Image (cartoon, rainbow, N blue to C red):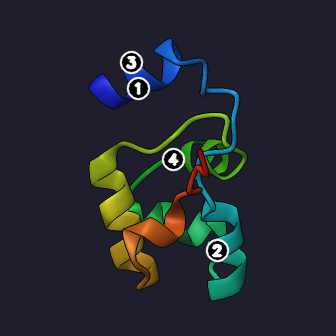
């Protein structure tokens, strides 16, 4: 909840924050397969992939585990 509030507060919800779609293509995993493994709705995973919404931190760790990648690979790094 705090992370979501922080992102909204700083106006970052319209920015690309994750690389999930890129990683799924690289790992040759469909959104449908990921949704099934996470026990999530396919629509939810689709929204994550288009950066319409962002997964909770616990979901990010689960996604990384399922895809066998590091959590940091799923995120866009900001260069300030």
The percent coordinates of residue 65 (x first, y second) are 33, 76
First along the sequence among labels 4 and 1: 1
Name the residue tied to disc 1.
Answer: 4
Crowdedness of circle 4 by 10 Å Cα count: few (<14), some, many (20+)? few
Residue furthest to the front: 80
Q: Secondary structure at mark 4?
A: loop
The one nearer the camera, 27 or 9, is 9
Q: CA distance from mark 2 to mark 4?
A: 16 Å
The nearer-to-camera label among 1 and 2 is 1
Q: How many numbered discs sit on the rendered protein?
A: 4
Name the residue tied to disc 3.
Answer: 5
Q: Is residue 63 above or below residue 1?
A: below
Q: Is residue 44 left or right of residue 26?
A: left
Q: CA distance from mark 3 to mark 4?
A: 23 Å
Q: CA distance from mark 4 to mark 1?
A: 20 Å
Q: CA distance from mark 1 to mark 3?
A: 4 Å
């Amino acid at each position: 909840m705090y992370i979501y509030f922080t992102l909204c507060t700083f106006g970052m919800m319209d920015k690309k924050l994750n690389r999930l779609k890129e990683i799924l293509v690289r790992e040759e995993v469909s959104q449908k397969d990921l949704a099934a493994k996470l026990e999530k709705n396919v629509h939810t995973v689709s929204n994550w992939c288009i950066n319409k919404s962002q997964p909770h931190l616990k979901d990010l760790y689960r996604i990384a585990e399922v895809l066998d990648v590091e959590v940091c690979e799923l995120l866009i790094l900001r260069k300030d």
